[in-house]
Each structure stands twice: as structure tokens, then as C-alpha cells.
């Protein structure tokens, strides 16, 4: 499967709402203000790595994630890596796409590839679990789940849904020859328009979010 390509400028333009609307999960993390200030003053040790390839061992009091976990289909491996990274009693707090997240959009992306003779389901990079399913995964890995919920959150997009598709649907479009990709995205747009576009031209994506707090 082709990997998703990210562009910071396009993400900020078409998907800034992802980070803005993720603030409640930051509150769930409840980071101590004095420690945050100290970290800012001393400078953060930042590394870039695949979440499923993390190699930390009992180093952190908390692991926080927003809008990432649904991009990783091997959920058990990520949970295992997070558990290994946490100290005893450490917190794993996250929000990601939950069951039925962007279901209308996802179905259209898959169907439009299917009609072109491709396996649309195989092109999907996403994993949108139920609260029960993810709680079971966390519990099997030794976490105590203090809170977990799937929250419907229809989200008004900052512009036309085509910008959303160009930002997030890269693995679907990558199945096609380059010359056919724009027409594919426009056909997806037309397919979802009756459900997601209001009479005034505003678009609303059918988001649901899985939010949880678990302790090691």
C-alpha cells in the first residue's frame, strides 16, 4: 500500500480543525503546568520515528496521541510499544478516529475505486475501532482503562471537501495513474455532496472520535 504523503502547509489550510478540536483530550491528559514550563525552558528532546517502531523502556510518565492511531492498523503493536515506553503507573491518553468515522467519505473513496476496477477496501489506510474493541486491546496489554468513549463530532470543514480529500486520501488516489487522480477525487466529492454539503455550500465531515485514558 502506498504511504500517505504529508504537507504541513496543506494540513494547516485544510485540517487545522484536527488539532484545534483535540484540546479536550489534552485536558484529559492534565499535564502538570510546572513540568511543561520546565520542559520549555530546558528544551525538548525530540525524535522522529514510526510509532510501531518506538524503542523506549520505562522512560515516560505519559504518552499522548491525537489523530494518529487510526492511521496504524497494527494497533496491538503500538499499544505494546506505548506500554514499554511508560513507567509503572504511567498514562496513555489519546484521541483518534472511532467507529464510523467519516463513514460517508470512506465509503465513497472505496466505491469509486471499486467502480474503476481496483480494490478500494485494500487501499484504505485507516482503522476505526469501537470503544469496546480498543478497550479490550488495552486491557490485554496490561492497561487499566479509566475512560473510553466514541464521540460523534460532525465537523464543519474550512472549505470545499476537495481540500480534505487532497490532504487525507493520498493512499486511495495513489492506486490510480497520476492523470486519473484528480477526476477520481472530484467523483468522490460528487458522490458525498448530497449528504455532506449544505445548501449554502458549507461542507461537514461525519467525524466520530475515540477518546480514552488508560494507566499502566
Image (spheres, rainbow, N blue to C red):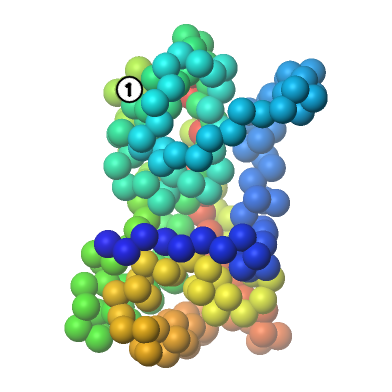
- Asked if 160 appears above or below 214 in the picture, the reply is below
Q: Where does the image place residue 209, in percent across and percent down from the top left?
A: 52, 49
For the point 27% across and 72% down, the residue is 120
- In the rendered image of this protein, does residue 70 appear above or below residue 215? below
Query: Is residue 3 among the parts visible in the rendering?
Result: yes
Residue position marked by numbered label 1 in the rendering: 141
Does residue 30 appear left or right of residue 112 in this picture?
A: right
Picture quarter with the C terminus: top left
Is 124 placed above or below 179 here?
Answer: above
Instruction: Name the quadrant containing residue 4.
Output: bottom left
- Residue 58 placed where, x, y %? 46, 14
204 or 74: which is nearer to us? 74
| Image x and y of residue 93, in percent | 54, 30
Instruction: Say if residue 146 shows up in the picture.
Output: no
Residue occupying the point 45% across, 39% down: 49
Which type of secondary structure does the marked residue at label 1 adopt?
loop
**Which residue lies at the image location 72% right of the left edge and 27% below the top edge?**
43
- Foreground pick, 53 / 143: 53
Q: How many marks?
A: 1
Amino acid at each position: 500500500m502506498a504511504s500517505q504523503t504529508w504537507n504541513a502547509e496543506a494540513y494547516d489550510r485544510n485540517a487545522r480543525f484536527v488539532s484545534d478540536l483535540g484540546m479536550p483530550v489534552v485536558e484529559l491528559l492534565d499535564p502538570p503546568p510546572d513540568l511543561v514550563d520546565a520542559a520549555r525552558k530546558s528544551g525538548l528532546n525530540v525524535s522522529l520515528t514510526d510509532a510501531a517502531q518506538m524503542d523506549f523502556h520505562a522512560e515516560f510518565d505519559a504518552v499522548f496521541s491525537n489523530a494518529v492511531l487510526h492511521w496504524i492498523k497494527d494497533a496491538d503493536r503500538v499499544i505494546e510499544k506505548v506500554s514499554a515506553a511508560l513507567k509503572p503507573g504511567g498514562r496513555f491518553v489519546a484521541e483518534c478516529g472511532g467507529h464510523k468515522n467519516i463513514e460517508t467519505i470512506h465509503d465513497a473513496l472505496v466505491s469509486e475505486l471499486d467502480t474503476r476496477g481496483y480494490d478500494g477496501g485494500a487501499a484504505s489506510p485507516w482503522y476505526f475501532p469501537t470503544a469496546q474493541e480498543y478497550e479490550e486491546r488495552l486491557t490485554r496489554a496490561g492497561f487499566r482503562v479509566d475512560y473510553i468513549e466514541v464521540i460523534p463530532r460532525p465537523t464543519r470543514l474550512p472549505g470545499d471537501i476537495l481540500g480534505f480529500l487532497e490532504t487525507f486520501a493520498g493512499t486511495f488516489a495513489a492506486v490510480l495513474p497520476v492523470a486519473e487522480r484528480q477526476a477520481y477525487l472530484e467523483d468522490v466529492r460528487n458522490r458525498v455532496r448530497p449528504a455532506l454539503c449544505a445548501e449554502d455550500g458549507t461542507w461537514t465531515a461525519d467525524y466520530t472520535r475515540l477518546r480514552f485514558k488508560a494507566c499502566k
